[in-house]
Image (cartoon, rainbow, N blue to C red):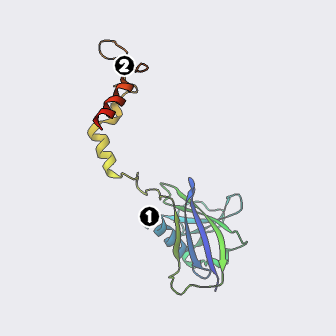
Amino acid sequence: MAILRFRIYFEEDESIYRDVVIRHNQNFLDLHAAILRGYEFDNKHKATFYRSNDHWQRGREISLEVYEKDYKAAPLLMADTTIGSEIRDPNQRFIYQYDFNKNWTFLVELINVSKEENPKITYPTVVRTEGIAPSQYGTKGLLGEKFADIEEKYDLSSIAVGDGFAEKDEDGEDLGLEEGGAEEGGEESAGEES
């Protein structure tokens, strides 16, 4: 049984990607669920795959369901379409679009085909994670909600550029250090304390 390894890039930043392994006889619904798990997205929105060529142009759709929109050709359904049936070349590509309002787009590329199945893995699964996934419903950073509290508490938006930084004190005297002045004195006093 062939095991396919796909790399799923976040379209807006190709340094963010997930590698998913899946059996060739599993369907696109399984791949759809694995991508959502890999990027920590919920499963509440519309989704579709597009067959793609080397230039990431969209071809025939493999859709979660038939949506009310115009199709050039009737879409295939994810639940009825096996991954292996859509592999046309060794570097097969698909475009995956999730949540048509937010337009989350991922570039899906076949990067490896193996004949050896790992009995310890439940397919499909994410086997590699690179980069911090985008937040599905808003900003997600290292500080998270704490930063919004800090920003609100201190009203960081009202600070004008240059405020609070002056080259002269209130009496108009220059605050710059002169040669041999305060710097040397600081070194001497530090030496005396030792």
**Residue 37 or residue 188, whichever sits in front:** 188
Q: Quadrant of the C terminus?
A: top left
Q: CA distance from mark 2 to mark 1?
A: 54 Å
Q: Position of residue 4 (x, y in %)?
A: 62, 76
Examine the image and state in which quarter residue 175 appears: top left
Residue type at the position of mark 1: Phe
Q: Is residue 49 left or right of residue 41?
A: right
Q: Residue at x 32, y 17 (%)?
A: 169
Q: Position of residue 105 (x, y in %)?
A: 55, 58
Q: Position of residue 112 (x, y in %)?
A: 66, 73
Examine the image and state in which quarter residue 10 appears: bottom right
Q: Residue at x 47, y 58 (%)?
A: 132
What residue does disc 2 label? 175
Q: Which mark is first along the chain, 1 or 2? A: 1
Q: Considering the numbered disc 1 on the image, is that residue within a helix, a strand or a loop?
A: loop
Q: Residue at x 41, y 18 (%)?
A: 178
Looking at the image, residue 46 lies above or below residue 21:
above
Looking at the image, residue 26 lies above or below residue 47:
below
Q: Considering the numbered disc 2 on the image, is that residue within a helix, a strand or a loop?
A: loop
The reply to whether callout 2 and callout 1 are in contact (CB within 8 Å) is: no
